[in-house]
Amino acid sequence: MLGTLLDKLQSLFSKNFVIGSIPLFAFLFLQSLMAYRVSYYFQGWVRSYFLSKDTFLQAMLSFALLLMVVIVSYVLSTVSVFMREILEGKHGLGEFLSNALSQKYRNRLITLESDLSEAKTKRRKLKEKQNLWTREMGEAYQLGAKVNQCVYQPRPNLVTLSIRRQSNQGITLGELEAEVRPLTNTLRTNNAELLTEASKNLDRDHGTLLQLIRYATDQAQERYAQLLTEFQFDYAGEDVAPTKMGNISRVAPHYAASRYSMNLDVFWTRLQKVVAADANFYSAMQDAKMQVDFLVALIWYTFSFTVMWVIALPCMGEAHDLFLGIAIAGPLLTYAWYRLALQNYRAFANLLCASVDLFRTDLLKTLRVPLPANAEQERLIWETIEQRLVFGEHSNITLQTT
Amino acid sequence: MPLSSKALARFGFAIRTAMVVLYITVAIAGFCVLRSKQMDPSNVRYIATRDLPAGYQLQASDFAFDPPVPPGERNRLPTWLDPTGHYVIDHHPKNGLLAQSDLISTPVIKVGKDDKGNDMVIYWFPLQKQAALSRVLNADSRVDICSGACVAQNVRVLSIVCSAATTPIDCYAALEVSTDSSAKLASEKKDYRIILRGDSTR
């Protein structure tokens, strides 16, 4: 039913416009419900016009309302960028406030860089040790297999570490080392392949320790990847914004600038034309953008609805049963939309970075600029084109004539 | 003098916290305001917004709630709390307080005497042919009863009684008439109509 309706509406309006209007529809519908709940006059108006038996009147009103929503939706679509930029902290903060609010992210970035460096070192050391320890224990195991005895008491620390692994807790390099050394020595002088209890225990502990080493290495790898993802997708180098969304919005331009010296603000419109040639990629990018805009609209509408009624209801003395619901659910929903918008913005920023990687050479071809021989030459080309396009400098660019 | 990163971070934290605290304060204040405005149904009284004679059938505009009930909340009140359609037992002046006990759901008809001290009687005038009048007339309205010529003039309406059980609603006007007029009206089977007098106060 909804799909058919969307298809029919799409033949009249673009998909983006139709889907982008849904939050506005929902907002106006909820506002009407609230007005109906609190206003005696609005109730009377609805009863006498909307719920009247005059179908012509109903049809006229419905059409007028639809027309109004379409017009409002068009008008609001022009300010959607501004609404998003407010969430990115680009407007109305001033330098001092902007700096004060950015400090949280600067501190987080400093901690992140330090954690990342630590995680990188730990991951590297663990990988090195994993190879070394596995080899050493393997050799010790082979040596021990030549003797015909086994005297071994299970190590209690190994049990503790196993429990920590089972409960998904971290294990340090030092803790592993403290187990590897004695066990390697034991393996050298004891046979772990006999049928005695001690031998079975030794074999089991050997296996457990190998498992623990793998676990610690995987965990270090995971931690490193997690921090790296946050560093790459949540921050644009050293440049921090007053809000999380602001930081994510700077990722793609920073990526293009730092990898290729390409100013995405200047080249984005041109790049878009090239990207559009790949229908699948362009559609994926459009969808990601639409999702971000959709959620940004939801944030603003939920916020406006909440603030409006949290102030209006006590002033009017109305709907005390709804007040608590709105006052609690409103901010929670606004925050939930914001978190979702961040997730989608990350995906969109990632697609933007990918579009720079994949289509920048096509853009050069479209601009009839010969492809560079190497990465550094490419940087120079983008800088030269930018200087010519933005500043109108007379830097000469060789063009392909064929 | 530039601020240190710690001071800036604290200031940023203070701004964010202040916004949250401000919202929570506004929400709590709003909740308290709403609670103070919330009424106990058992203590609800009404204030007459006009002079209400005995037998008057209350309309929504004839009274205000005390404590006030916002318009949007009125249709959510328990049925027994909404006095619309109930009859006033005794006369209440404008701005006078009405308690639940001053109202009754059955018509109140108090017949008086004429200028000479003679007892007046009730004449039940059917309003089937003048259904619109049932919404206009009320206790103390003044009407003339005519059929070409008027058989009684400046007659006081005692009450309007309607039976909601029938469709269309069957309404009667209880009119205070003299014994003579009552006999005349009963004996002459004319198509009488009642006419609201221009000088009627209601």
Image: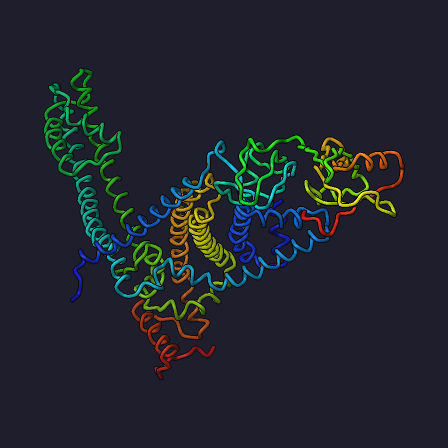
Number of residue marks: 0
- When the figure is inspected, residue A130 is found, relative to residue A278, above or below; the finding is above
In the image, farthest residue toward the front: B116
Q: Would you say A149 lies left or right of A93 here?
A: left
Between A322 and A252, the residue placed more toward the observer is A322
Is A100 on the left or on the right of B66, as rendered?
left
Please report the residue visible at 87 percent of the width from the left and 47 percent of the height from the top: B149
State whether residue B52 is above or below residue A63.
above
Residue A85 is situated, as x and y percent measured from the top left of the image, at 39, 61
- Where is residue A261 shown, x and y percent of the image? 32, 68
Between A85 and A110, which is closer to the camera in this rendering? Answer: A85
Q: Nearer the viewer, residue B132 or A93?
A: B132
Task: Please indicate whether residue A2 sits to the left or right of residue A52 in the image.
Answer: left
Tell me the quadrant of the picture where the N terminus of chain B can be found. Answer: bottom left
Q: Where residue B49 sits: x, y (%)?
A: 57, 46
Furthest residue in direction top, as rendered: A196
Q: Quadrant of residue B104?
A: top right
- Farthest residue in the bottom direction? A394
Residue A243 position (above or below residue A135): below
Q: Position of residue A334 (x, y in %)?
A: 41, 48
Which color scheme is applied? rainbow
